[in-house]
Image (cartoon, helix red, strand yellow):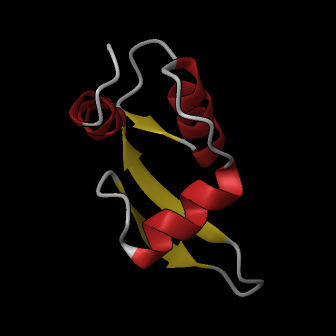
Amino acid sequence: MGNKLTLTINETAALCREHGWTVGKEQLAEGIAEGRYPFGKILRVGNTGRKTYEIWKADVLAYLREKGAEV
C-alpha cells in the first residue's frame, strides 16, 4: 500500500486483516454506509448502484489502534 493516503475497500479489508480483524469487504462497505465505521464515507452511487468510497488510511490505522491493534 506504500504511501497512499486513501484506500479501496479491498485494501482496507486487507489492512484490517493484517492487524488481526477478520473482516470482509462486504462487511466494511455495509458498516461505512451505515456509519458504524468512522474511517470512510460514500462519495457517490453510480447509475448501476456501484458505490465509490473515500477511506483515509490514517483514519483506518487510528481506528485499529483505538480497538487495541498494534499498528
Location of residue 63 by image quarter:
top left
Place of residue 32 in the rendered image (x, y in percent of width and height, measured from the top left) = 45, 65
46 on left or right of 55: right
61 relative position to 4: left or right: left
Question: Residue 44, how many percent across, how many down?
Answer: 50, 76
Q: Which quadrant holds residue 61?
A: top left
Residue positioned 21% across, 35% down in the render: 66
Residue 50 point in image, percent of width and height: 70, 73
Query: How many numbered circles are shown?
Result: 0
Query: Which residue is more in the foreground, 42 or 16?
Result: 16
Instruction: Describe residue 59's horizontal placement relative to residue 25 as left or right.
Output: left
Q: Quadrant of residue 27?
A: bottom right
Residue at the extreme bottom = 47
Q: Residue at horizontal 51%, vertical 31%?
A: 16
Q: Is residue 23 above or below residue 27?
A: above
Q: Residue at x 68, y 47 (%)?
A: 24
